[in-house]
Image: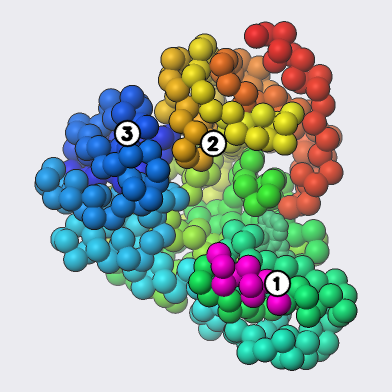
Amino acid sequence: MFKKILIANRGEIAMRIIRTAREMGIKTVVVYSTADATSLPVRFADEAVCIGPANSKDSYLNIPNIISAAEITNADAVHPGYGFLSENANFSRTCQKHGLKFIGALPEHIDKMGDKATAKATMKLAGVPVVPGSEGILKSLEEAEKIADEMGFPIMLKATAGGGGKGMRAVWKKEDLTDAYNSAVMEAENAFGNGDMYMEKLIEEPRHIEIQIAGDQYGKACHLSERDCSIQRRHQKLVEETPSPFMTDELREKMGEAAVKAAEFIGYEGVGTIEFLVDKHRNFYFMEMNTRIQVEHPITEQVIDYDLIREQIKLASGDKLSGVNHYPKLHSIECRINAEDPYNNFRPSPGKITNLNIPGGHGIRVDTHIYSGYTIPPNYDSMVAKLIATAQTREEAINKMRRALDEFYIEGVKTTVPFHRQLMDDPDFIAGNYTTKFMESFVLDEKYKMEEEEED
Ligand code: MV4
């Protein structure tokens, strides 16, 4: 087992990894930028190494400085968390070259799943349902027109180097295809240096339901059930829950089996997530595979009583999987609390937290790195806490979430707490009646802000 893990990340996920490593008797080193010198992970890790200035590209994305920090502290493994370098094949390879175990995916899997057309072709070979569309990359606009005519509109154009909603165009009518194709190629070339596009039938009003998987170094994989992540704004997840209110036992078996088949087909090592689009008839289609731990992993941990970071570390150290699949015994919902102003188009609201009350009580978990007096830097992602409510039933979990949100005071900055509080009163959310289109019609109600303002 590893003696010392270097955590190449910051914020709540760095705290999350420090906690499990400590429970396993593993020393931790955290790297930090000058903007994070007063952060909680720096305080709680066994060692901390400043690797550069606030700007991510000179610190958290600076591979030579991170590798140097691992060498001077004699770390034997590196945990990348999520975001930053967690799906950077070159970082995974560089760790390998320096004798550091990368507690993430193998470089070849990061590359293969990072190229979306290749990922899709691989899944098709594995027998996983994929959205009907082009066979790989479109060779020309003419080919795009031909395939679109054969399939019928609407269609979706996607950049193979994209993902997470980047470099994607929905096209509803034939006359719009040329402009959409040309602008999508241009955007993808500028954003990713790769303008290759593929085409799919557009799935209307889909749900985003993902399956957690784990694979060991001996070819075995298992699934740990689903997470419904359909409530998103501009491709940013806001709320996630498990079990999905749209799931049936039969659909869970079929999606779980497909996810395990995919993982075993590529010989996946580590924890990962297979994202599916699910249409209103409960047909499911491969969307993307994430080769990292995800922000929303805690809701899975809560309902199957499992530590996924511990699993990551054990699998990276060569442990075998028992191979059994895991099913939800409870219901868990996560609200991502961002330092953003929901009443001003969710614009970021960094700054000093002048007063803080963190909710608690039975069934409430808060994964966070903030503390009273902490200054939220403007340089990074705006998420400051994950509030997770778990109960026997969905109704009880929603009720618990309402109570916890009413206790959650973060003063000195604006946060999305009032937005989440309103969401927990929304009839469609309460009915579990939502798709990825939900936020397009959600109207913020100042009433919830008033409660916030009155408290201030
Ligand atoms: C789609 C789709 C409809 N049809 N593909 C969005 C980002 C990336 N995960 C793929 N995405 C989509 N792909 C086809 N063929 C709709 C989306 C989509 C979406 C998917 C999941 C969660 C939120 C979304 C928001 C907008 C579009």
Type of the residue with mark 1: Ser
Helix, strand or loop at mark 3:
helix
Q: CA distance from mark 2 to mark 3?
A: 18 Å
Tell me the crowding category of disc 1: few under 14, some 14 to 19, or many 20 or more residues within 10 angstroms, Cα based: some
Q: CA distance from mark 3 to mark 1?
A: 39 Å
Type of the residue with mark 3: Thr
Q: Nearer the viewer, residue 451 or 168?
A: 168
Helix, strand or loop at mark 2:
loop
Tell me the crowding category of disc 2: few under 14, some 14 to 19, or many 20 or more residues within 10 angstroms, Cα based: some
**Is residue 176 in sight in this rendering?**
yes
Q: Is residue 48 magenta?
A: no
Q: Position of residue 425 (x, y in %)?
A: 78, 28
Please name the residue shown 29% across and 41% down the image. Answer: 52
Residue under numbered circle 3: 34
Q: Quadrant of ligand 1?
A: bottom right
Q: Which residues are magenta?
A: 182-191
Q: Position of residue 72 (x, y in %)?
A: 12, 45
Q: Check the image and tell me how it is coloured.
A: rainbow
Magenta span dominant secondary structure:
helix
**Callout 3 touching callout 1 (CB < 8 Å):** no
The answer to whether 218 appears left or right of 425 in the picture is left
Residue under numbered circle 1: 183
Q: Position of residue 229 (x, y in %)?
A: 64, 49
Tell me the crowding category of disc 3: few under 14, some 14 to 19, or many 20 or more residues within 10 angstroms, Cα based: some
The answer to whether 295 appears left or right of 103 in the picture is right
Task: Compare marks 2 and 3 and give the one earlier in the sequence.
Answer: 3
The answer to whether 149 appears left or right of 251 in the picture is right
Q: Nearer the viewer, residue 46 or 2?
A: 46
Where 438 sits versus 359, above or below?
below
